[in-house]
Image (spheres, coloured by chain):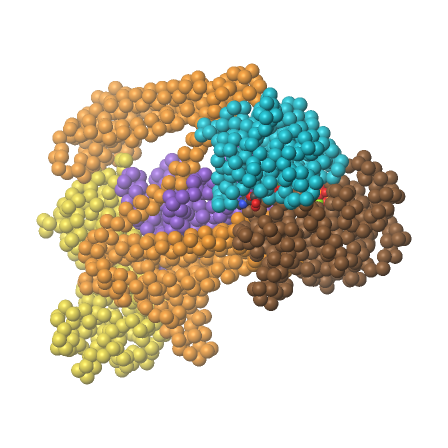
Chain colours: A brown, B cyan, C purple, D orange, E yellow
Amino acid sequence: MYDAKLDERVTTMDDIKISARGVQVWYGDTHAIKDVDVDIADRTVTAFIGPSGCGKSTFLRCLNRMNDTIDSARVEGTILLDDENIYDKRVDPVQLRAKVGMVFQKPNPFPKSIYDNVAYGPRIHGLARNKAELDDIVEKALRRAALWNEAKDRLQAPGTGLSGGQQQRLCIARAVATEPEVLLMDEPCSALDPIATAQVEELIDELRENFSVVIVTHSMQQAARVSQRTAFFHLGNLVEYDVTDRIFTNPSDPRTESYISGRIG
Amino acid sequence: MYDAKLDERVTTMDDIKISARGVQVWYGDTHAIKDVDVDIADRTVTAFIGPSGCGKSTFLRCLNRMNDTIDSARVEGTILLDDENIYDKRVDPVQLRAKVGMVFQKPNPFPKSIYDNVAYGPRIHGLARNKAELDDIVEKALRRAALWNEAKDRLQAPGTGLSGGQQQRLCIARAVATEPEVLLMDEPCSALDPIATAQVEELIDELRENFSVVIVTHSMQQAARVSQRTAFFHLGNLVEYDVTDRIFTNPSDPRTESYISGRIG
Amino acid sequence: MIGSFFMMLVVLVLSLPIGVAASIYLEEFAPKNRFTDLIEVNISNLAAVPSIVFGILGLAAFIQFAGLPQSAPLVGGLVLTLMTLPTIIISTRASLKAVPPSIRDAALGVGASKMQSVFHHVLPLAMPGILTGTIIGLAQALGETAPLLLIGMVGFIASNRPDGLAEGLLSPNSAMPAQIYEWAKRADPAYYERAWGGIIVLLLFLLAMNLIAILLRRRFERRW
Amino acid sequence: MPTLWLIVIVLILAAVGYVAGRQRSLSSVDGDVRRLHSLPSFYGWNAALWALLPALLALVAWQVMQPVVLNLSTQPMLELDAAQPGALGLAMADVRRVADGLDLAVQTGLMSAEGARGIAPEEVRAQLGGMGIALGSDVTPQTLAAAQHYRGWADVGQWLETALVLLLSVGGLALAWRATNAEFRARNSVERVARWALIAAACIAILTTVGIVLSLIFNTIKFFGLYPASEFFFGTTWSPSFGGSSSLGILPLLWGTLYISFVALVVAVPIGLFSAVYLSEYASPRMRALVKPALEILAGIPTIVYGLFALLTVGPVLMSVFGQGGVLGVTWMGGGTAVMTAGLVMGIMLIPFVSSLSDDIINAVPQSMRDGSLGLGATPSETVRQVVLPAALPGIVGAILLAASRAIGETMIVVLGAGAAANLSLNPLEAMTTVTAKIVSQLTGDADFSSPEALVAFALGMTLFVITLGLNVFALWIVRRYREQYE
Amino acid sequence: QTRDNVQIAGSSTVLPYASIVAEAFGENFDFPTPVVESGGSSAGLARFCEGVGPNQIDIANASRPIRENEIETCAANGVTEIIEVRIGYDGIVFASQIDGPEFTAFEPSDWFTALAAELPVDGEIVANPHTTWADVNAELPDAEIMAFIPGTKHGTREVFEENVLLQGCENTGALQAFIDSGMSEDDAEGACMAVRTDGASVDIDGDYTETLARIDANPNGVGVFGLAFYENNTDRLKVATMGGVEPTTETIASGEYPVSRPLFFYIKKAHIGVIPGLQEYADFFVSDVMAGPNGPLANYGLVSDPELAATQEAVANGTTMGSM
Ligand SMILES: Nc1ncnc2c1ncn2[C@@H]1O[C@H](COP(=O)(O)OP(=O)(O)OP(=O)(O)O)[C@@H](O)[C@H]1O
Ligand SMILES: Nc1ncnc2c1ncn2[C@@H]1O[C@H](COP(=O)(O)OP(=O)(O)OP(=O)(O)O)[C@@H](O)[C@H]1O
Ligand SMILES: [Mg+2]
Ligand SMILES: [Mg+2]
Ligand SMILES: O=P([O-])([O-])[O-]
């Protein structure tokens, strides 16, 4: 089977933030990611698309070593962040994750108040000098995640008492509040209505000015709207990776084409 | 504020499965659902739409008394299922839930094998006389939820080890396997790719022949595609409830119009 | 030794089901009100009741009131059961509480009754904690002497091999730790050594008992 | 019919009921399970319970009542002085022994039924003695007559009992059978029974408390009749003596209890929590499988061993540090027995209470919580401290409470490690003793039972009970305030 | 509810003797082996006095005579006829580590002066100033005072207080000094028996094993033991004379050695003839074979009662307490 090896155009991206080579992931005996090479550019939004179960989340979790927490998961290959192999022994996964933030596919607010959920990251990283600054950070994060209006009157209410979509935005706010250099977002808008989605997309666009964002999405439209580059995964393989426009208008792999046109799943 | 009271057209539906009158829900002091009247027709797909946090899930959970499990939740009003008030003392919520199945917004597979997840409902309801029948039921449910291909080789693997979208389909399969008369689906396709979504939509269409389905969705397109009737919720109110076509082409409430056209959130 | 064995049998057979049943009721079914609060406080308070007080209770309730025979492992077992219950209830409740509500919802959502959701899903997930409580509770009961002093499980009792379960439960017998205690007191140094031997036997017994629970516990452990 | 057989028959009937109920439910819907309200097995259980419960209840009631009735009917025959209830009891015991002996003789075939009925009083002792049934003295004709009467009625009673129980069992079965149809809510009815069983289990705790209070209260009141309450509660010396004129102030004991428990918890809680966190968050599964049970063994070592450990090892070690000629060159410690000694050793014993239980609870916190925190760049330790532990808090508090309770209730370690002297002092290197230790020693001591020196044990128990109740209410309140519920 | 074995409860001091007898009784007679429980003299007597009947014990062992109020309780509960059986004496000895300082001879006055909480010095009553035995009595070794005496729960403590401390108090004239200082006689006696709490004297609530362990750990320690216990541990302990008398079975039996206490058991007469084997057990216990000077009980350390014959007769006749 033909695997999309690194494309000329992609290797010539000027500013590469993350560069993955030969990444393989096994869950026990299941081979979930098969030899994937990807370069993720700085100040860019990269979209991962592909049918459910193809390995998008798995690959995403490789990028900040969240796979470490799954006992059965085994990762091979190299992933360079700013030219440093994050799987190197000397790399502290904690620092890595502070730099590479993540919004999980299933919203997982802490069983704490909304305020404490958002303030958690800034607190542990000492981003605020005092209470007022922290309040500011929390408010700003909630605003950016389009949750401020709904949450401002109940900041002390538990985050777990929010609606599904609100929880999702809470998790986005929580990730944004720590100001990571790279933000990995696993289907961040899956439970959001169109308007909230638009606000989150705006946020992503705004983040792009300084950081890089990787977003997993099932919505082609969303990928087309927010991303500059799109990677298409299928059955654990990276089938195609290119600038978004080209993927959607002129894909080079037949599988990509049939996925985009809605034929394979 | 104007609340959509029951519309002429709706009351004249011939076959009403569920009829809710004056439903109010409080979470502690928060008034989450405000005096909602809805009739849900048999053999119909009804879609609930509305911005995140407007009370769709809350209302859905009223329909099979899942709100009973939330300590702080308090429900008022009457909901008739086949002309019997489900909040009546004599009604057994257990039997009710066997009739009114539910797919939750957040996938929540049991920490058991995939097979056992699906087989659980049929087992406790005695739907299978023997192992072979049970196998059949499980296979059929997984097929209908478009998960069979991915799961058939790992039926004994834990359901919690599936990808997000797979878990969602597993929960759909689990709900379908008990063959409820009414199926409540809270954003069942939020984590699914377009092809899987299409398959689930097909399933919904198929279910409609015998049962009624209520689906919460954030995708207008999906609502338009699968549902015959659509209810639009906003801030705990039922703003408008009508046949789907009319809602999308000619809504009578300005709020509905602005939501559909993407202006309020 | 035989006394200890029968006593532990009684404790296990009674305290585990009763403890788990009580916790399930309190945690899953009981309405949350003052009365259940009372029970809750009450149970944790029972854990702090000195074991000898259970002995006083056992003497009053089982021997004088119910007329059960003195020195019978059955009575010892009953007293130790009462003593072990709080430990098991507290640990079981804690682990029931730790099971995420979404699991319960999932079961209820497919039409399981509350009882079914608890017994099919919640209880297995809480099993490690329950077994831990049982291990600790039983270990404690096995090593306990004070309450037995009062109900006559201490002293010299000719231990003939009982003919059957019923007789084993009802015929007078002495418990291992009480025996050790008694031996340790004897003037004769030979008895003193016997006491240490007894302690080792007791520990082995404990180990064997725990091993089963530990193996079981490992089967139930999982993360989600 | 012997009771055992009766039970077996009822059980068989219940089994029959199960099968029949199941079958009938199935046939009532022509095998289409879906039309049934509940699973067929619930119908089976329903029938089984109907066959079982009333019959067993009746059986128990009969078993309790029959001896009472029999005794009442036999007693007049003994022509005993009614003013002596104890003597009557003894005489009745003799009657029963003779009656049982004769029954046994008939059963084992050593005597024919007629022979047993016609036996002469003077033969009884020898005959029964020959079969290993010892009688205290020769049997009087009265006793024998009473025994024969007893036997006769016991026989009748047994027949009636058998009939009643079987009737109830069959009747219950029939009722359940009749009720079985597709609409019948068998599951609800079975679950109702199960629920009552659960409630009954929960009530045992209440009953225990009531029992404890009842068994303490009378003697406590008696004590306060003999000894002024104010001196008991506010007295600062504890020195019981045999000749009376003892001072029985609870304060030094309470202080010792709290102090020793505090030291023990200071040892056990951090070590226990750290090991719990280590076990659940850092240790490899192999390590965990080994260390956890190893820690649990600590809970099972007989406390007398801990006591000896305190006495023979820890005490001298502490002495060599703080005592005369110790490495610190101070003489803070007068003897090996001290609060510190007992506290340390007790702390070790309590480690597994904290560690094992907390470990299970921590383990039950969903992985997604950890992921959420780690994903924000939190270190594992921050994750544990700020996310996992708070989420597991109710369980951990429960574990700590359990440990504290055990510390308060422990005696052996205190007696051997902390000494028997009641002291009110701040110095942790001084000997003290606890309420519990004194309860035991006063109860098992040589003071006579109606003297305040022995009765004080009950008052101590009662006071301790009330105090721990207060502490528990406080703990519950704390947990309520900080409880975090995850999804 | 019927019961065919003898049930005994009570003193832990008597327990070893009772169990030796019970074991032998079970072997040599057709009756079932009696059940002997321990739990303390008081607890045993309390249960003894609960009443008559098959659910009540038959015999209470005690390391002290039954008290008047206990007899009253008994009577109130229908236990009117009690047979008192004195089985012998328990000698109370003062012993120290075998390699420790030479504690070989004590006088009651030494113990009083060493352990009293307060004592008169030069006419004034002061807190006990002595720290070494040599301070107390120049003939004693110059070792720190470290006494392990029975805790207040033990009957032995009572004997110790009365036969040693009070005696010493009188002998030194301190009793008189107390009275002279304005105390009533009762208070003065109380002051004689008050033990210092500054650590020089350690109460042992446990048993002799604990005392032995403490002496093992503390070379200067002197402990109070039962004669039986000491005799079984002569390899680790050496005993001191009291008032110049060496504690032996003979000196105790003759009453020469001042510190000893009688051991008893009490039988419910109402149970005799009803509980199989009760009479036989009691007879067997006091028989010469068991309780005699050369019997197994004496071997274990019981000081045989010189008046054993009278006791045997009393038991055989069922002589109750009141009728004596
Ligand atoms: N357990 C709870 N406790 C307190 N408030 C709650 C709870 N669940 C929901 N709410 C609040 O009730 C309102 C309605 O919530 P609901 O979950 O019904 O929204 P929804 O329409 O399903 O939104 P979404 O599309 O985001 O899932 C929200 O404001 C939410 O914060
Ligand atoms: N913890 C796990 N243990 C075993 N297998 C796993 C685990 N997590 C994921 N998998 C498997 O690995 C494959 C890839 O999963 P992954 O979660 O990366 O998919 P995904 O692309 O994110 O899908 P979705 O869009 O449904 O979230 C799937 O087949 C899945 O079943
Ligand atoms: Mg995924
Ligand atoms: Mg929702
Ligand atoms: O147990 P004793 O009564 O002999 O101390």
Q: Quadrant of ligand 1?
A: top right
Note whether residue C197 is visible.
Answer: no
Give the image location of residue E230, x and y in percent. 32, 64
Q: Residue at x 12, y 35 (%)?
A: D81
Q: Is residue B151 left or right of residue D417?
A: right
Q: Residue at x 25, y 77 (%)?
A: E127
Q: Is residue D478 left or right of residue E209?
A: right
Residue at the bottom extreme, as displayed: E122
Give the image location of residue B201, x and y in percent. 71, 32
Q: Is residue D404 left or right of residue A148?
A: left
Note whether residue B81 is visible.
Answer: yes
Give the image location of residue D472, x and y in percent. 39, 53
Residue B152 lies, with reference to residue E104, above or below; the image says above
Name the one closer to the observer, D229 or E81. Answer: D229
Name the one closer to the observer, D34 or E324. Answer: D34
Residue B236: which quarter of the image? top right
Q: Residue at x 28, y 33 (%)?
A: D133
Placement of the N terminus of chain D among the 4 image quadrants: top left
Give the image location of residue D267, x and y in percent. 47, 63
Q: How many marks?
A: 0
Residue C112 lies, with reference to residue E298, above or below; the image says above
Name the one closer to the observer, C27 or D90. Answer: C27
Residue E190 lies, with reference to residue A196, above or below; the image says below
